[in-house]
Each structure stands twice: as structure tokens, then as C-alpha cells.
Image (spheres, helix red, strand yellow):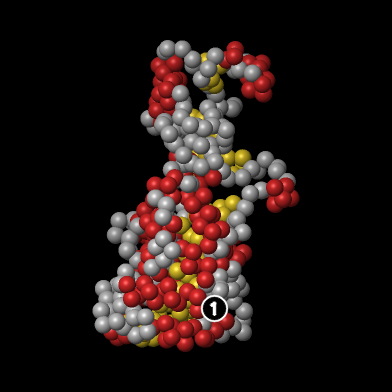
Amino acid sequence: MGAEIKLLVLTNAEEITGDAAVNLEIWRKLGQKIYSIHHGDGINIVRLILMNTDLIVDAIYGTGFRGKVPEKVGRIIEVLNSSGKPIVAVDVPSGLEASNGKVDGPCIQATHTVTFGLPKLGLILEPGAGYAGRLHIADISIPAVLVEKEGPLRYLITPELVREWLPARPSGAHKGTFGRVLVVAGSRGMTGAACLAGEAALRAGGGLVTVAVPETLHDIVEMKLTEVMTAPLPDNGKGCLSKEAKQAILSLLEDKDVLAIGPGLSNDPEAAALVRELLSSIRVPCVLDADALNALAEAGELLRKVQAPVIITPHPGEMARLTGVSIREIQGDRILATSRAALNWNVVVLLKGARTVVADPGGAIYINPTGNPGMATAGSGDVLTGCIAALLGQGLDPSRAAAAGAYLHGLAGDLAAREKGMMGLVAGDLVLTLPEAIRNLG
């Protein structure tokens, strides 16, 4: 015997038109009851029905919803949410904007969401993702050729995609096969950033990794790192890189495949000037993070001087300094902010945060579903920088390296949190869990 189903219509059933009216008539002919909740005691009827209900199916609004639900509907949504019953949302939770994840008022807090055909941006981006529960994508037979031809260049990063992108490891490989990475990082008090980036590059599959730091910090880094090679760079006497380090860095790059620069460099004016002067001389793919981005505050156009592929990895604050746009505006439309910067500067932009967004100058957008609040800890971004640099060195194109790096970094955080919990999670836990994250791709 099938389940007993109670249909609640939040309007006058006699006023329903179109396809909904056709389906409502079919429901009537099946002899099923319809509760039309459009009068004053509607809330009480909902409460009574919920007393003998095991599962709620939310189909109040669909993907065309915009704005805020009416007050009456909002009160019903609040009753449903507080019932303690599991809720399955159809396509999107009611009260959520499918195109952007915005929620302005009461919204169904779904246990599961079954969406049709393709995932909706609003189910991936915050705050919408927090209302969707576990996401299921139902195949409704949209032809794959149509999706490929007409679909937007927006991708949810999945383990299948990342697995497809990662290169095979040939039996005749040697350490040089998997990329030579140079990490320029660190300053007095922030040697840990350099070490984390270097170790992450190795754990993400980099073949040869060299960490170059101010010479007064070199001994510290040598004692800390075992498998990573190190190089001292001219120091300005304050534990920061001097402008004279430029030639030494270019010499080190002669036999390298990738440069990662920025973690822990400090905001020292001389180190910042070094970054700006170095850009036009770089001839290998590079990842710019942290203080390398701060050196370009409101001067993002300097990125166009780099004659090699560039990935920048700002958090919203760094993005605001680069663009001159407020953090609020950036967070209000993370996809627009990221894609606009990628196009303006002809670089791949990875905007950190809940649901990291990656954009390339060609218009492709990648959204990362992995990661958790426990990763909001010092050094987490340095690990990401090393991970992306390693993937670049293994031959991934910049947008895929950034997207795969974001996915693996977040997955490492999820695996580490599963073992240790979110509170007390540190960046070093992510480094150690990166190989497991890669193995989990299958």
C-alpha cells in the first residue's frame, strides 16, 4: 500500500490555472483530498496535519521565485521548519532565489533538495546552499548535446572532473616529470607561511619544490623542511625581502616550471616594490597570493604586464583592495566580481570564501562545493597556494589547476574535520590530508 498523501494548496484551489489546474484535476479524480490554505485559520490546519505527517514535500515556489515570500506563506514556512519533520524540496527550497542563492525572509530549510536536469547556482552559492540540505540531481532527459551547445560556462567542480584533469603518472617518470616549483615567501614572524606552501606543493604531487626566503630566515626554514629544497634571498635587514632579490629570483626561475609568490611576504614597502618590479620579468606560470596581492592594491592592471599565465587567489578583503570595490559589493555577487576581474586583467581569479569561485578570462566559471568553517584558520590559504602551484607544474591549464586545487584543498579540510573536528583544525592538518583527498577521487 502506498503512502497517504495530503496536498496543501496555499491559495484558493479554484483560482489555479494552466498546467497546475490540469494536474489538480487529475488529483481530484484520483479521489485525493485537497486542503486549500488561504483563509485565517490556515496555520492551525497546517499544524494539525503535521501531527500525523512523516515527510514534508516542499513545492510552494519553483526556480522562477524572486524576492521575499508573502507574510502568510512566510508564517507557514516557519511552522514547517519548526516541525522537526524531514523536508524534501522540489527543484529549490521555497524562499530561495535559484539564480543566485539569495534569501530575503523565511525560506524552507530542506533536509534534501531534488533538483531537475542541472544544479542551480542558488543551491551551490551561500546562503542558498545552507538551505538546500543534501542535493540530488534528477535526470529529466535533457540531451547532453543541448547542454554542451547551449549551456552556460558554469561548472560545479566534482570529483569526476578533477580526476579527469589530473595527469597519469607514467611508469618511466622521474621527479622532474611532475614539475619544478619555486615558492617565494616568508618574512620575520611568518616563516610558517613559506613552509606550509612548500609542503603543500609536495603533498599535491609536485616533483621538485624550492622555497626561497629572506636569508636571515633561511636556517629556520632548512630545519623545518626536509623534502623541500631551500634558497636564501637578499634581505633588507628587517627580515623581509629587499629589492635586490629580483635578480636572484629570476636566476632561480631559469630551471623552474612554476612560481608561487606571496605567502607571508609582509607589507614591507621594499618587499611590495619587489613584487611590482618582478611582474614584467616573469616568464613561467605563476600563482599570486596574500602579500603579493596586497602589493598590487588598486593597481590590478599591473597583472597585464606578466607575459605568462597568472592565477590570483584573493580573499574578499584582498579583492576589495585590488579592485577598489567594497567587500559588501563583492560578496553580494561573487560570480560577477570574479569574472569581471578575470576579464579585465586577463588572469584566472580564485575568490576564496564559502563556495570558492574560479573564473577565467574566457568566461568559464567553476564553483567549489568542498570545505568547511574549520578551515578559517591561519595558513589555510598558504596551503591552497602550494597545492595550485603543484598542479600547474604537473601540466594542468591555469583555470583547471585553480579549480582542482580549490576542490582538493576543501576536500582535505573536510577529511581532516571528519577526523579531528572543526574546532582546533590547523593548516598543517590540511597538508597532511592532501594525499588522502587525492586518493578519494577514485
Residue 404 at x, y percent in the picture: 53, 63
User: Residue 176's image quarter?
Assistant: bottom right
Residue 34 location, x and y as percent? 56, 16
Q: Is residue 210 above or below residue 84?
A: below
Residue placed at 47% from the left, 55% from the top? 356
Secondary element type, mark 1? loop
- Foreground: 101 or 136? 101
In the picture, which quadrant includes the C terminus? bottom right
Residue 208 image point, x, y percent: 48, 82
Left or right of residue 66: residue 432? left
Q: Amino acid at mark 1?
A: Arg
* Residue 46 visible in the displayed image: yes
Quarter in which the N terminus is drawn: top right
| Left or right: 187 in relation to 322 | left
- Is residue 249 depicted above or below 415 in this figure? below
Is the residue marked by circle 1 packed among few (<14), some (14-19), or many (20+) residues within 10 Å? some
Q: Which residue is mark 1?
A: 283
Instruction: Tell me where residue 370 appears, x and y as whole percent.
Output: 47, 55
Q: Nearer the viewer, residue 205 or 180?
A: 180
Q: Residue at x 51, y 86 (%)?
A: 254
Q: Toward the viewer: 379 or 273?
A: 273
